[in-house]
Amino acid sequence: MDYQAVLEEVAAYARPLVRQGRVADYIPALERVSADHFGIAVADINGAVHGVGDWEVPFSVQSISKAFSLALVMAQSPGSQGEDGIWKRVGREPSGTPFNSLVQLEAENGIPRNPFINAGALVVTDRLQTLTGDASTSMLHFLREESGNPDLAFDQAVADSEAEHGDRNAALAHFMASFGNLENPVPSVIEHYFWQCSIEMSCRDLAVAGGFLARHGLRADGSRLLEAREAKRINAVMLTCGTYDAAGEFAYRVGLPAKSGVGGGIIAVIPGRCTLCVWSPGLDARGNSVAGAAALDHFTTLTGWSVF
């Protein structure tokens, strides 16, 4: 596979869509990001990386971090008992509602539908905090190791901006705490959640760091982070729930497990082959990158690679 040639063709296809959509304006620090950016990178299972456009420009990972926090929780709770533990507190079904919705929590006794909506991610962060004592720093260290980039860091301005405008997330956390579904104090859980979302990474960094999901749970150094069945399950939830309440449409168009973020990034996995990351800040009404989704659609069309 001539990845570079494919990525060039994908970029040419997607670039006319770059200025479509709107940057995330409810987080002021993200609103200031130019909508003109576009980058895409692919990392194969052996570690070779290719990219075009702004593929080495760091951006705020936002909800892409949710896939990594879930992986770390599952990795640090080995065996069926630990896995059953987190899945007793969060479901695995598509929500059908916006990522920050409170609607379903009351009807479902404080159990979020899946780990990739905000309520579910707060539960996962809470569990990671219990397991590690420092959820956000443990994630940052892991991402530095897997990406091979020791300079990865939190973005203070983004974290502060999210905290200042984080009333909805605080409401979600307090509501779940009222049902006994948080182990740690709400302010601590929210703080670590915001820090995780504020991590800055490039398409290159994310494609490489997510490689364990394409290698059936093996880390970049060959050690095992997850059992193959656990990596399979994370990929499955990414396919059905990873792109907010547009997961069905995304699966129909692209056919890959993926996790998006309102910073404009999308990470996608082709098990046994490679991991991709695309970034373009212009979002559709459901919070997914317009040009990014189109780029991944075109990539699977050109290559014929999907999970179907």
Image (cartoon, rainbow, N blue to C red):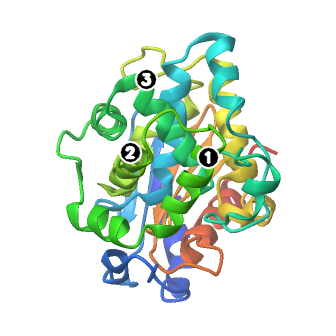
Badge 3 marks a residue whose secondary structure is helix
Which of the pair 66/226 is nearer the observer? 66
Q: Badge 1: how crowded within 10 Å, few (<14), some, or many (20+)?
A: few
Q: Estimate the x, y position of residue 198 in percent, counting from the top left.
A: 33, 58
Res 2 seen here:
no
Return the residue at label 2: 49
- Please name the residue that numbered disc 1 is placed on: 178
Identify which residue is drawn at 28% across, 33% down.
141
Q: Quadrant of the N terminus?
A: top right
Q: CA distance from mark 2 to mark 1?
A: 46 Å
Mark 2 falls on what kind of element?
A: strand
Residue 226 spot, x, y in % from top left: 55, 20
Instruction: Name the amino acid type tagged 2.
Output: Val
Residue type (three-letter) at the residue carrying disc 1: Ser
Side (left or right) of 17 relative to 195: right
User: Which tag is nearer the camera, tag 2 or tag 1?
Assistant: 1
Q: Nearer the viewer, mark 1 or mark 3?
A: 1
Q: Nearer the viewer, residue 6 or 289?
A: 289
Crowd rating for badge 3 (residues with CA inside 10 Å; few <14, some 14–19, many 20+):
some
- Residue drawn at (37%, 36%), measured in percent from left and top? 135
**Alpha-carbon span between mark 3 and mark 2:** 32 Å
Frontmost of labels 3 and 2 is 3
Q: Is residue 273 visible?
A: yes
Disc 1 or 3, which lies upstream in sequence?
A: 3
